[in-house]
Amino acid sequence: MNFKALSLGLAVAVASSFTMAAPVAYKIDPTHTQTVFSWNHFGFSTPSANFTDIQGVINVDNAKPSASSVDVTIPVSSVNTSVTALDKEFQTADWFDTAKYPNITFKSTKVETKDKKHFKITGNLTVKGITKPVVLDAVLNKQGIHPMTKSPAVGFNATTSFSRSEFGIANYVPNVGDKITVNITAEAQVPAAK
């Protein structure tokens, strides 16, 4: 028996297993990612708006999901309420104060696995310069090779809710709801090598 060849083969196999288990960094695709938020309006309706041009990275560790992480930046100027006047009003100091705080950010601090598709992602949400912990209930939609780009890709949906007054945006509370419900859908891909 060729022990040298056997040892070399085992070393290659072990190295390969570590390579396969290594965390993968997926860059968020802003053209297929949306953050939609909704609120109660005087009890009559539940309007919604969305942010676009979302940037960030989702680090996925399949071998150790708790080591996965999310880091997202949302430009406040991208808000779309379908009401032009409200889009402009949201940029003012009474609301998001975009001139001073141009971005909303979310940085995960803990990822908990419920099963292979469902996760709880705890993190720090920063809005208008105020940081508070929130929890995302996330569902893995798919992980694999994207059929168009041929790059490794991953997709998630997630939901969360919080009180906007905790972030210094309390206009018209309680007539206009304090609770904000957020629905997120995101695609991310491994950038092609240059």
Image: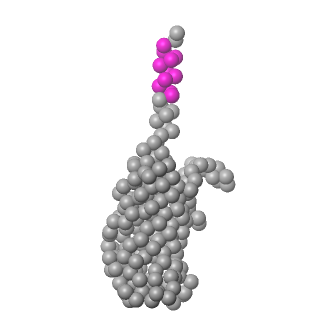
**Residue at the spot 43% in from the left edge and 76% down from the top edge:** 180
Q: Is residue 34 magenta?
A: no
Coloration of the structure image: one colour
Viewer-side residue, 134 vs 78: 134
**Residue at the spot 47% in from the left edge and 31% down from the top edge:** 15
Report how many numbered discs are placed on residues in the image.
0
- Specify start and end residues of the magenta stretch as a single range: 3-13
Residue 9 versus residue 172 in the image, above or below: above
x then y, percent, for residue 112: 40, 53
Viewer-side residue, 187 vs 46: 46
x then y, percent, for residue 63: 45, 42
Residue 91, quarter of the rendered image: bottom left
Can residue 78 be seen at all in this image of the molecule? no
Furthest residue to the right?
A: 148
Viewer-side residue, 136 vs 90: 136
Furthest residue to the top?
A: 1
**Residue at the spot 49% in from the left edge and 63% down from the top edge:** 158
Q: Is residue 109 left or right of residue 89?
A: left
Residue 83 versus residue 156 in the image, above or below: below
x then y, percent, for residue 164: 37, 78
**Chief secondary structure of the magenta span?**
helix
Can residue 117 be seen at all in this image of the molecule? yes
**Residue at the spot 48% in from the left edge and 55% down from the top edge:** 118
x then y, percent, for residue 93: 37, 85
Q: Is residue 12 magenta?
A: yes
